[in-house]
Image (cartoon, helix red, strand yellow):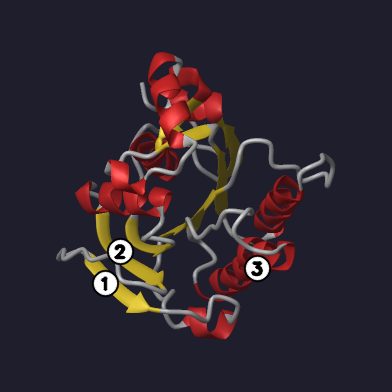
Amino acid sequence: MPNPSDKTPRPLGRVLLTGATGMVGSSVLSALLNEDSTQEVVSLGRRPSGRDHAKLSETKFSSFGDAQAIETHLNGIDTVFNCLATYSSRVSRAEYEEITVEWLRALLSACEKVSPNATFCLFSAQGARPDGGGMSFALKIKGEAESALFASALERKFAFRPGYIAPSGPRSSWKPADYVFKPLQRLMPKIGVTSDELARAMLESPMRDPRESAVLENGEIRELLG
């Protein structure tokens, strides 16, 4: 068990990253490549990130629901960042559940078998409902994903529930809502974080949080930014 009085940061070591081409995953990838304690980033994705870096090893991968296929990429992994996600408005409920929960279960199963001591970081959502309540099917499914994570046998696990996520990338990557909410987020920072800020917080937790498991709401995420 981690010692709360020990302030020595844990190195991230060898990292497995999913979702590196998404808005949050792209920011997490940049932060990982700039972090001294990152030894290597093993990125599994359906598309290449377009990055060229000595620490980065990319594998074109589509079998996210196959735990056995994932296992071969987990040897020696110290930290996992699962940023694989999709918008509920773009896919059916069944597809959303498959990507959000079933693919996560496969990754967790592979981690339990190959790297049970790894720290697992899950990109979740504000309002996720592990109790199955609420009106939004997307938040119920996000809650189901969190429940799968915390029921796993992994040593350390964190779920991150940011509020509005303002894109840190170029304007060409903005969604229609960003034209309203991004200026608002600059005026009222507490409503959310930028994708780069979220990435920083997601790296801070496995390195410095003494807890074995935690759900970090938007306020705690912002506190990690100093």
Q: Which residue in the protein does label 2 denote?
A: 41
**Which badge, 1 or 2, is on the more N-terminal residue?**
2
Distance, label 2 to label 3, CA atoms, is: 21 Å
Q: Tell me the amino acid under the disc marked 1.
A: Ser
Q: Which residue is mark 1?
A: 57
**Position of residue 188 measured from the top left corner of the image (x, y, whole percent):** 46, 15
Mark 1 touches mark 2? (CB < 8 Å): yes
Tell me the quadrant of the picture where the C terminus can be found. top left
**In front here: 135 or 143?**
135
* Three-letter amino acid code of the residue under disc 2: Val
Spatial CA distance of label 1 from label 2 is 6 Å
For label 3, the crowd category at 10 Å Cα-Cα, with few meaning under 14, some 14 to 19 and many 20 or more, is: many
Q: Is residue 11 visible?
A: no
Label 3, label 1: how far apart the Cα atoms are = 23 Å
**Residue at coordinates 50% horizontally, 79% vertically from top-left?**
70
Q: Secondary structure at mark 1?
A: strand
Q: Amino acid at mark 3?
A: Arg
